[in-house]
Amino acid sequence: MSNTFDWKTEFKSIIIVDNELFQNKYDVEITITPNVADLKEQSSYFERLKNLFELVLSNTVTGWREDTLFQNLLTKSNNRFIELPKPPYDQIMSAVCFCKANAVLDGKITVNKLKLGSYQGDGITYSVDKNSKELTLLDVDGWFSKKFSKFDPWWLRSDTATYDKELPKGLYTGHFSWNNQTIPVDKDAGDHAKIFEFNPKVLDGGKDKDK
């Protein structure tokens, strides 16, 4: 299983910078290595990777958790969001995309390297692998309340969440579901929440979670 492949994709998101909204398009190039021999299983998880960028991350509003406008939109609008632990520069976006892509692939496929640039990014492309310093930008303290303090933020989980919300029955797990490849819209976000089993963080290969 040593074959390595490159795949290019893109997605659009509105970013919030200094309480202003800017349209942005991200160009992504990913180097992947399958870790399973079954071609059907490979194909299924590659579709999951495609859907992550083309459906889950696309047509969202991206902002820093501490940004006032981001918090207002999060509570008063019906948009889908990407919540970042720092302002939405391409360097941190590349890091969260690398981690989330590996997480949703559950170790069946490994994302070895992810390159990301954007329309708003001044022509700079960031390249992230498991040893990149960009990953330290995702180190967070106090991301959850004490009740959920041992759980992983959304970019390290294999669900489709792109922001974190604590609900009475557990953590929000995303607007979509991996249960089938059509990824239907979840009409009741509360019904798609649960408590997650805590496991150590593994960036290069994803993690197994109870789904």
Image (cartoon, grey):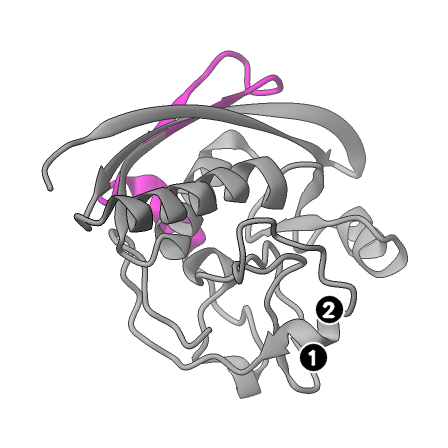
Q: Closer to the camera, 162 or 104?
A: 104
Question: What label sits on residue 189 in the rendered view?
Answer: 2
**Circle 2: residue type:** Ala
Viewer can see residue 88: no
Residue 160 point in image, percent of width and height? 55, 57
Residue 200 point in image, percent of width and height? 29, 72
Residue extending farthest to the top is 123
What residue is rendered at 60% in x and 49% in y? 182
What residue is rendered at 27% in x and 53% in y? 108
Residue extending farthest to the left is 2
**Circle 1: residue type:** Leu
**Residue 121 forms part of the magenta stretch:** yes
Q: Closer to the camera, 46 or 174?
A: 46
Query: Local crowd at mark 1 within 10 Å, few (<14), some, or many (≥20)?
Result: some
What residue is rendered at 35% in x and 47% in y? 135
Q: Closer to the camera, 71 or 80?
A: 80
Report whether 152 appears left or right of 18: left
Question: What label sits on residue 167 in the rendered view?
Answer: 1
Distance (Cα) linking label 2 and label 1: 10 Å
Q: Earlier in the sequence, mark 2 or mark 1?
A: 1
Q: Is residue 146 above or below residue 15?
A: below
Q: Is residue 43 above or below residue 6?
A: below
